[in-house]
Image (cartoon, rainbow, N blue to C red):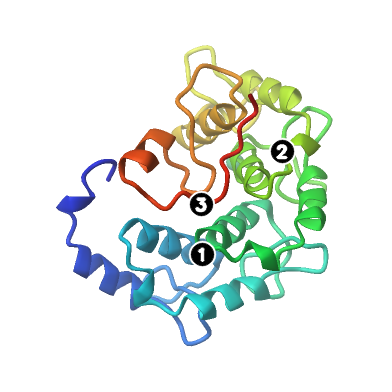
Amino acid sequence: MYDAVDKLDREGVVAFISGLQQPDGSFAGDRWGEVDVRFAYCALSALTILDALDSIDVDACVGWILRCMNYEGSFGPVPRAESHAAYVFCAVQALALVDALRAVDVDQLGWWLCERQTPSGGFNGRPEKAPDVCYSWWILSALATIDRVHWIDVEKLAEFILAAQDEDGGIADRPGDVPDVFHTFFGLAGLSLMRRVDLAPIHCVYALPLEVVQKMKLPPILPIYDSR
Ligand SMILES: [Zn+2]
């Protein structure tokens, strides 16, 4: 809602989100009941923005997210599921929002995330998968939050994103593919976080422009990664 949060039915939104918390602390995405760590991140982020974290059981949510952590320090979508870098973003940033990152072994997680960088410079989401521009954001922002960006080759990552640009504009999932707005956003967000092109700086936890986060006076949350 950018700078128009005051236009929301705040009580209604808070009641809707808090009503989706399950007895085990997790969040469903809607009343049909699909549960995974994406919805925990969305709930914690939205309730942080609305200053309404006291409407849910935060400790139960943190406990459930930590049950999604696997032996290699990474996270899957639900407990006992295969680790996947997009869910690492959700888990790490959700824990950052409520100051619960101390429960994460950042060196072990950082190692698993760094292992996702392929010879092309792009990240894959799981071992043996093809690189994809959207992981430039999921992984890079998680590395920024745990302060391990210096463990990867940012120049090669930027080259991979820029090579996925289409001659008519837009960014694809990988070089040679057709661009879409989803990968264009994550490509720009990754380039912004790396400060490799002249873009407005982005906040690694909220995935919003830093200017908006400051304007809305949102809780600051950890030092912002700064490559300068
Ligand atoms: Zn993708």
Q: Farthest residue to the top: give it.
A: 167
Looking at the image, which residue is at 76% across and 48% down? 113
* Figure label count: 3
Q: Where, quadrant-wise, is the C terminus in this rendering?
A: top right
Amino acid type indicated by mark 3 = Ile
Q: Specify whether tag 1 is near ligand 1 (CB below 8 Å).
A: no
Q: What element carries label 2?
A: helix
Q: Is residue 128 left or right of residue 85?
A: right
Q: In this view, does 158 lie to the left or right of 44?
A: right
Q: Where, quadrant-wise, is the N terminus in this rendering?
A: top left
Q: Do the residues labelled 3 and 1 touch (CB within 8 Å)?
A: no
Q: Is mark 3 on a helix, strand or loop?
A: loop
- N-term mark: 2 or 1: 1
Residue carrying label 3? 221
| Res. 149 mark | 2
Residue 203: % across, % down: 49, 40
Q: Quadrant of residue 51?
A: bottom left
Can the viewer see residue 68 in this picture? yes
Looking at the image, which residue is at 84% across and 30% down? 119
Q: Quadrant of residue 37?
A: bottom right
Residue 83: % across, % down: 72, 61
Mark 3 to mark 1 CA distance (whole Å): 9 Å
Please tell me which residue lies in front, 64 or 146: 146
Amino acid type indicated by mark 1 = Val
Mark 2 to mark 3 CA distance (whole Å): 17 Å
Residue 27: % across, % down: 46, 73
- N-term mark: 2 or 3: 2
Looking at the image, which residue is at 36% across and 63% down? 47
Residue 70, placed above or below residue 167: below
Residue carrying label 1? 98
Can the viewer see residue 31 in this picture? no
